[in-house]
Amino acid sequence: MSEKIKVLVVDDHAIIRKGITQLLRDTEDMEVVAEAQNGAEALQLIRDNPYDVILLDISMPGEHGIDVLIKIKDLKPNLPVLMLSMYPEDQYAIRSLKAGASGYINKQDALSQMVIAIRQVSTGRKYISSELAIQLAENLTHHNQDLPHQTLSHREYQTLCLIASGKKLSEIAETMILSAKTVSVYRARLLEKMKMRTNAELIHYAITHHLIP
């Protein structure tokens, strides 16, 4: 039998990491050879060891998954990274692909899809669901009609989602492991870009566009 696909799982939830490990243990052509609970651990492991595929959670304490993705691609441009998320595809999938991800898997999808995705990206191909393929086609058709939230940076978008979920400034700062002052800057920037003035407007927009998981 050919060599197994070596996978690194990066997720701050131990239960999810162990679940993925068990799934791949029962899959004869792949194995989890290491786990990391945050971006810093993942980057160190990637510097020191070879992997065939990285499974990377998009939402972790501290550095956002897309920021970690960008750093991984700087280190090893050809290393396939498959993003894991609880968020619907219309929120982060396209952002992830633009940042260099090889695919995007929603954690609520069937585990069998994860195995298919890992096999596919390990060969250098991209993995997208049929729903995302439709969305990408629509975006190409309406490329000049970007919604306001699509113009935000990763951190600004994360701030928007956290505000919309009802978190206070101090809670957002704690979640993102940033100072309250820095979060205030992100809030000011996203309000300016979206031409809004209050949190109430942001929350209404987020609900209308299904940005809250």
Image: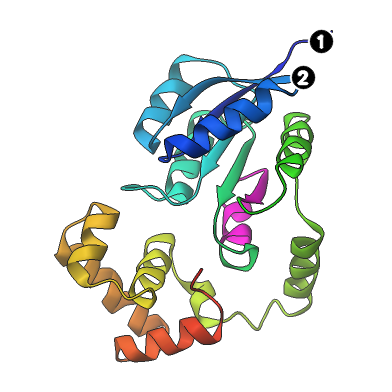
Q: What stretch is highlighted in magenta?
A: 92-106
Q: Are marks 2 and 1 in contact (CB under 8 Å)?
A: yes
Camera-nearest label, 2 or 1: 2
Task: Kindly identify the residue that appears in the image at 17 percent across and 66 percent down.
Answer: 170
- State which tag comes first along the sequence, 2 or 1: 1
Going by the image, does 31 lie left or right of 85? Answer: right
Residue of label 2: 29
Amino acid type for the residue under numbered disc 1: Ser
In the rendered image of this protein, does residue 116 appear above or below residue 177?
above
Task: Report helix, strand or loop for mark 2.
Answer: loop
Task: Kindly identify the residue that appears in the image at 72 percent across and 23 percent down.
Answer: 26
Residue 182 pos. (x, y %): 20, 63
In the rendered image of this protein, does residue 205 appear above or below residue 139?
below
Say which quadrant the N terminus sits in.
Answer: top right
Q: In which quarter of the image is residue 199?
A: bottom left
Task: Kindly identify the residue that appears in the image at 58 percent across and 36 percent down.
Answer: 55
Q: How many labels does the image show?
A: 2
Q: Which of 143 and 51 is in front in this view?
A: 51
Residue 139 pos. (x, y %): 72, 73
Residue of label 1: 2
Q: Which of 186 and 208 is in front in this view?
A: 208
Q: In which quarter of the image is residue 159?
A: bottom left
For the question of whether residue 159 can be seen, the reply is yes
